[in-house]
Image (spheres, helix red, strand yellow):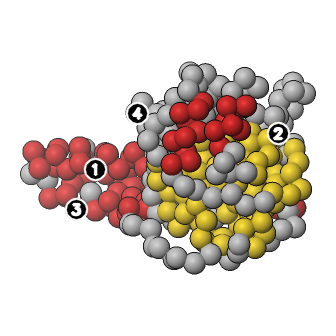
Amino acid sequence: MPAALAVLTAGLLAFHRAVPNSVGRLGSLLEAFLPWLGLVVPVLLGLALLRRSATALVALLLPMAAWMYLFGGLLLPGADTGTHEVVAVQHNVSDENTDPAGTAGALADAEPDLIALEELTPRALPTYEKTLVTEYPYHAVRGTVGLWSKHPLTDSRLLDIKPQGLAKTWSRGLRTVVHTPHGEVAAYVAHLPSVRVRASGLASARRDESAGRLGNAVAAEKVRSVILLGDLNSTVDDRGLAPLTSRMKTAERGFAFSFPAAFPLARIDQVMTRSATVNHVRTLPATGSDHLPIAARITLG
């Protein structure tokens, strides 16, 4: 039995795209938690040792190899390029956050060049603006998302990623141009629709539709370098984000599980790039949100 389970686990890791999405989006649900399949290995190792099964021990090499191939690189320390590098922080601050000033201060303490925020409310927005204005004199807000920057911003506009069936007031996308010392960068801030896990499976149709709209916008972007920051409500392994992950680079180092803050199980807060490299992502200390902030080191060019 341990040997068979080891082969099955290896198969799910290596061929997760073969798990169909037609029923309950089971493929996306598996991919959202794919790294956690690695926990099966120590459990099966214990069973194999108890049964003194040489076959099971050999079979365990398969899931170990598959996991290392997919995720082993994320465990390595990020390289310090030292040149043409910017630091970006991404955070869903929560519309129920009771300490926006403390949250803003904590994010600024990481000394990033860019701070992207989601779930901004009209009541909390002035506090974020007041707290960040000294170190981040440039900012743009559209709907419930915003970007604060140490560098000038131009051409800021609403980014329409609203799926069908939602109210006209639903506004969760922003596009602007950041004038960094290393050149212009088109910055996108997005908050994709939430997903729900139900008895019938994963309900992600609206999220997937919104991801498609966002992917089309990135594809049409004329500025060469692009940084996308946002709460995308999924991991980069989820095929529902393929319109983005097929066009952009994801983090080369770091897991940075960001949700839920009390016991992080997945990184659904993302930093992606085009014509740039996300060298490393890490989580920052908890704020008043149900998400953890993540910080990313990005090399432009």
Q: Amino acid at mark 2?
A: Arg
Residue lying at the far front in this picture: please name it. Answer: 134
Which residue is disc 3 drawn over?
A: 58
Which is more N-terminal, label 1 or label 4?
Answer: 1
Please name whichever residue, 71 or 279, is drawn nearer the observer in this view of the structure: 279
Residues packed near mark 2 inside 10 Å, few (<14), some (14 to 19) or many (20 plus) = some
Distance of label 3 from label 4 (alpha carbons): 33 Å
Is label 1 or label 2 in front? 2
- Write down the quadrant of residue 27 in the picture: top right
Q: CA distance from mark 3 to mark 1?
A: 12 Å
From this viewpoint, is residue 247 visible? no
How far apart, in angstroms, are the residues tagged by discs 1 and 2? 46 Å
* Residue 279 x %, y %: 53, 67
Looking at the rendered image, the disc whose residue lies closer to the viewer, 4 or 1, is 4
Q: Residue at x 64, y 51 (%)?
A: 135
Where residue 127 appears, as percent x and y from the top left, is 67, 31
* Residue 263, label in figure: 4
